[in-house]
Image: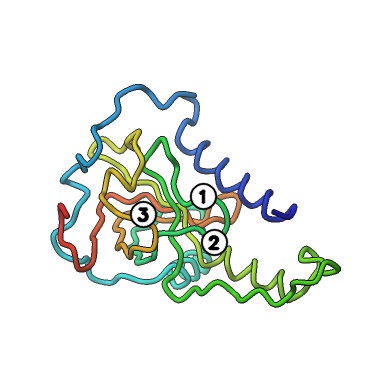
Amino acid sequence: MNVYQKTLLAGVMGTLLATQTGCQGSLGTDMPQAGTAPRFALLEQEPSGSRGVLEVRSDLEDRETPDQWSEIVLVGRIGSIEGETWDPNRAAFVVVDRSYVEPAQTHDSPQHDADNCPFCRANRKKAFASSALVEILDADGQIPAMHAGRLLGVDEGQTVVLQGQGRIDALGNLAVRATGVYLPGEGAGN
């Protein structure tokens, strides 16, 4: 893992942890049982107006105040470009735009400097823009202290439609607070 990748991973995980613990400094001890997804979060029908990560990011960046929470409906594929997809201790994960495809590795020589290669830098920039950090909120507006995959019954690579709020955070990440989740082709509760 190069310096850029380590910095990106640290920033993403730091943002996820900072937004969870805030001033409280603790996740608490009330852990829901595996597979007991809160029914309010699972939608029976796909919300209208869903847009991909790149489109939502562009819309928010074009606003006068991109750091303010705005209502969104986002569709994405669960997975991380680099690093971890899931926060193991709470309902938070990463999604990528469905159009994003991992670039082929064409620079296998030991002399290649990925940090200074213009093609590698362009690919990293596209990868960053294609991802969103997602937090699932319960009825009280809290992030359940449980792995989101177990909570919602989803796996990496699965498409999800998220209804809630989005913004561009101080680090330039697309941050999403999802209050509703639709699982295409599965229906609520599956």
Distance (Cα) linking label 3 and label 2: 22 Å
Quadrant where the N terminus sits is bottom right
| Residues under numbered marks 1 and 3 in contact, where contact means CB atoms less than 8 Å apart | no
Q: Name the residue rendered at 53%, 65% in the picture.
A: 61
Frontmost residue, 71 versus 22: 22
Distance (Cα) linking label 1 and label 3: 23 Å
The reply, left or right, for residue 112 in relation to residue 183 is right
| Residues under numbered marks 1 and 2 in contact, where contact means CB atoms less than 8 Å apart | no
Q: Amino acid at mark 1?
A: Glu
Specify few, some or many for label 3: CA neighbours under 10 Å numbering under 14, 14-19, or 20 or more: some
Q: Name the residue rendered at 66%, 73% in the picture.
A: 105
Q: Residue under circle 1?
A: 84
- Indicate which label's residue lies in the foreground, 3 or 2: 2
Label 1's element? loop
Specify few, some or many for label 1: CA neighbours under 10 Å numbering under 14, 14-19, or 20 or more: some
Q: Which mark is residue 170?
A: none
Q: Position of residue 102 (x, y in %)?
A: 55, 71
Q: Position of residue 6 (x, y in %)?
A: 68, 49
Q: Amino acid at mark 2?
A: Ile
Frontmost residue, 31 versus 128: 31
- Most extreme residue toward the front is 109
Q: Residue under circle 3?
A: 165
Q: Earlier in the sequence, mark 3 or mark 2?
A: 2
- Indicate which label's residue lies in the foreground, 1 or 3: 1
Q: Amino acid at mark 3?
A: Gln
In the image, residue 4 sits, relative to residue 86, either above or below, namely: below
The reply, left or right, for residue 162 in relation to residue 26 is left
Q: Residue under circle 2?
A: 81
